[in-house]
Amino acid sequence: MLDVAAALAAYPRVTLAPAPTPIEETARLGDELGIRLLLKRDDLSSIPFGGNKVRQLEFYFGEAQAQGADTVLITGAVQSNYARAAAAVAARLGMEAHVQLEERVPDMGETYYGSGNVLLDDLLGAVRHEFPEGENEAGADAALGALAEELRAAGRHPYIIPLGPDNPPLGALGYVAAAAELVEQMPDLSRRVDAVVVPSGSSLTHSGLLVGLRALDQRVPVLGICVRRDAVAQRARVARKSAEVAGLLGSEGIVTDEDIQVFDHVLAPGYGRLNDAVFEAIKLTARTEALYLDPTYTGRTMAGLIHLARAGTIEAGSTVLFVHTGGTPALFAYEPELRARLADTD
Ligand SMILES: *Cc1c(COP(=O)(O)O)cnc(C)c1O
């Protein structure tokens, strides 16, 4: 078994999230789905609204500080939790943050552009930039690179939080650490839990957790719910990222093809867009557990879990661990869309 703590110690890290985050049983929601449902509360953190990005940022800010950076740059969707979390961490560490927000979700109104995470970006004092395309990762990275050049010319020391697919997945190390945390909380994880369910976007969360669990000899299936790309594209991404994460730990080959499971039943009509299943998942979770899920990530992931439970892919009576990755502020950015659906269904 790999000494995960020793492997992680090779990478500079800023501790942001007091570990461990709680694991809670959500019995009322579990009953609705005919399963035993546990939630890993990664939405709780010292950085408010927490989320999976706080774990990932521990390693990016570690590298930024090791390089003597005073400014961080990041790109994401308008309602990016990543950009907001980076702005929050920068504020806490006394650094300047530049967030570049991409047009990734079509046909959204004013609330989407001003509320939720955008409001928090502004409160945190982040410098906001706009990028007109949402599916041009290379273009967004190039624009950020140009901005970094300008800042450098002005005497600052910028660090770009590199998210494009061609960058080493340092942030995934945060979820390798989360896997170790999980196994410490539940040493017999693989015997007690039949599946772990996570959102699969950039796949740093999915790949990090998968590699971490396998490195610790835990064979529990990790089910990724697609939030941005279809299952074919996402499977390739998870495979590539998992191999890279394993490489960062010096344990190449630890994740096999059969380990990679991705499901896209609830993805349509696409990234960041509500559908009936996602709305139902958000409403059901609020009304059974008083827990909030967001339309882009956690609501979609819960909708994916509900689909798999109803379809029997997750068998009745199974024990499932759902990783709540945060994202709560985005809920408020979807107020008009949520209100219209509440008015329709209640
Ligand atoms: C970014 C995000 C995800 C997706 O995580 P990846 O590591 O990019 O796959 C899931 N949930 C929330 C709340 C997020 O902000």
Image (cartoon, rainbow, N blue to C red):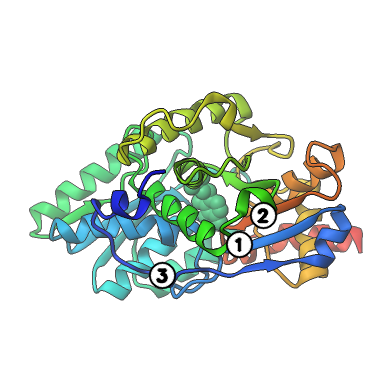
Q: Residue at point 28% right, 45% down? A: 144
Sequence-earlier tag: 2 or 1: 1
Locate residue 294 relative to residue 283 in the image: left or right.
left
Displayed quadrant of residue 55: bottom left
The numbered disc on residue 7 is none
Report the residue that reaches farthest toward the right.
346
Sequence-earlier tag: 3 or 1: 1
Q: Nearer the viewer, residue 206 or 227?
A: 206
Q: Secondary structure at mark 2?
A: strand
Locate residue 85 relative to residue 94 in the image: left or right.
right
- Label 1 Cα neighbours within 10 Å, binned few <14 / some 14-19 / many ≥20: some
Q: Residue at point 58% right, 40% down? A: 219
Image x and y of residue 234, in percent: 55, 31
Mark 3 Cβ and ligand 1 under 8 Å apart? no
What residue is shown with label 2? Answer: 321
Judged by depth in the image, the label closer to the viewer, 3 or 1, is: 1
Where's the N terminus, which quadrant? top left
Sequence-earlier tag: 3 or 2: 3
Q: Residue at point 37% right, 61% down? A: 86
Amino acid at circle 2: Leu
Image x and y of residue 154, in percent: 10, 58
Q: Secondary structure at mark 1?
A: strand
Amino acid at circle 3: Asp
